Image: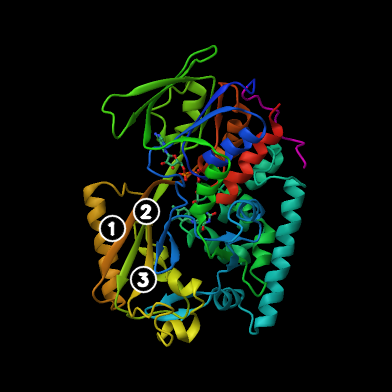
Amino acid sequence: MITTGYPAISGPKSVNDRIAVVGGGISGVHMASLLKEKGYKNIKIFEMRNEVGGKAYSRLRRGVYNEFGTIFLTDIYDQVANMVKRYTPRSRIKSKGLSSIMVREFEFSTWRALLAQNTGERTREAARRRIQEAVERYDRIHTCLFGNYSFELMPRPTPEVMRQIQGTVQDFLERHDLMLLAPYFRTYLTADGYGFINDTAAIYGMAWVPPAVIQGTFTPENGFWILDGAFQAIVIETAKQNQLNVHLEANVERIKRLPGPGGIQITYSTRDHPSVETEHFDFLVLSPAMNSLLNIVDFNAKERHLFSRLYNSNFVTTLIESDNGIRGNDPQVYYNDAVDQDDYPVFASFNFYHAKNNITGENHRLGIRENGPDKNPQETQLYYQTGFADPFAKDVDIMIQSKLVSHLKKFRKSNPRVLEQTKWGYYFPRFSGEDIARGYIWDVLDMQGQFNTWYIGSSVCFESMESVLEYNNLLMSIFH
Ligand SMILES: Cc1cc2nc3c(=O)[nH]c(=O)nc-3n(C[C@H](O)[C@H](O)[C@H](O)COP(=O)(O)OP(=O)(O)OC[C@H]3O[C@@H](n4cnc5c(N)ncnc54)[C@H](O)[C@@H]3O)c2cc1C
């Protein structure tokens, strides 16, 4: 484990300290389990919803889990893989298979074909060679900039390195003559709802899409993996098997931090009790997006300065049952013509029932093996929309639903029925390229423990399951 270059941080002082963890998503539950393993005895998780999981949210339908939140793993997801092995060993990690890309009205292609086309080479082999050369160069640049390090977030770069990585992913690729790799970053970031490469800070791309991830796309499995079980089950089982103390339906409304033992006051409401309750703790772990807590936690000037700079998008995922209409070749489809629109286009859909039952290619497109083990002729599919406007605002909601309906009509899905719709606010809370160049993401790391508080979860690293686990591991390794 290489911890050189990271700061040493403080944390809870004694194993008897009372520790409050706000949020029962993967980051909060995992951190509580790590602390418990280290001998801390008094840990309590406050979770506003009636179950743990947060953005790992899986619903069983027709014998398979549909993922409304976390969907896939990439080749570098060793921490998630460890959790699967340890907590849900019966769940298998399987190749996600290919995706269809709709390039124009009902004209479908594949990522591989599009990426090869982008090189301008005439043969696939020549295209592949050029991409491979670019990946190797990216690898050398990555190592030259950051050296070897053990966690997803690299140690704070030197001012010279900071200069070379400042700006957006696109700035970085242009600066280093790596534009051939732009479609990969577009696939990983834009097509997965993380935003445009000319807006997303370069550091997020370099941390979450290191060269090894792109190399993975050259393998037969394509570098993308799904679970035949459920991502949420990992969180539920971690809480259960470690016998964590989770207070469900506890909505934390106010946190005050006064000096001295027991100085952390958590005030929360529960569904069944109209009045709020307050409990006292010695140490605090915050896992929701830090910018969602600006009116809840008594952040001091330094914390407020950093966290008010975060901005986020939002996600809407809808599971719809309908009569089969037009389909792509694969259970997962990206609508490339829509992905560049700003607000809430349906930019992807995923038929988990077919993917998990291995119904792909012609069988999927034409409904030849319609419709898998349960013989139900209807299609059950998840639709993904993302945007910056508040999805809970009435006018925005109207726009979201109407874009969804238009999409279904266009693809001739008749008799649609919404089985469930989930809205995720505070998706990918991030710093701008300028704020990353100011070092804000590492300023947060330096601040860990200083105010009797740890800040974990996606807003202080990156919005992925692997990233939040990696960040927890980093904190535990540099905590003395
Ligand atoms: C549609 C979608 C697709 C995704 N796809 C992928 C993917 O393919 N691969 C991948 O790795 N990641 C993916 N992600 C991201 C991944 O799911 C998240 O990064 C990860 O689950 C974040 O975990 P977390 O614990 O940091 O945050 P969260 O899961 O958001 O947990 C925070 C918890 O805090 C609770 N909370 C918030 N405020 C309060 C309060 N005031 N009081 C009490 N409780 C509170 C919330 O209810 C929540 O349970 C996806 C996310 C979404 C939404």
Q: Residue at x 54, y 51 (%)?
A: 234
**Mark positioned earlier in the residue sequence (2 or 3):** 3
Is 448 on the left or on the right of 66, as rendered? right
The x, y position of residue 380, in whole percent, is 36, 71
Residue visible at 69% across and 80% down in the picture: 126
**Which amino acid, by three-letter code, is at mark 2?**
Gly
The answer to whether mark 1 is within 8 Å of ligand 1 is: no
**Mark 2 — residue?**
387
Q: Does the residue at mark 2 contact the one at mark 3 (Cβ under 8 Å)?
A: no
Q: Which one is nearer the viewer's eye here, 479 or 219? A: 479
Element under disc 1: helix
Instruction: Name the amino acid, label 1.
Output: Ile
Q: Quadrant of residue 134?
A: bottom right
Report the disc number at residue 400. 1
Q: CA distance from mark 1 to mark 3?
A: 20 Å
Residue 192 appearing in the image: yes
| Magenta residues, start to end | 1-12
Q: Is residue 8 left or right of residue 223?
A: right
Residue 47, percent across and down?
42, 37
Question: Which image quarter is the C terminus in?
Answer: top right
**SS type, badge 2:** strand
Q: Amino acid at mark 3?
A: Thr
Residue 198 appears in the figure: no
Q: Which comes before the other along the chain, label 1 or label 2?
A: 2
Residue at the image position 73 percent from the left and 47 percent from the top: 145
Magenta stretch secondary structure, dominant? loop
Q: Quadrant location of residue 351?
A: bottom left
Instruction: Please give the label number shown on residue 380.
Output: 3
Q: Is residue 256 above or below residue 404?
A: above
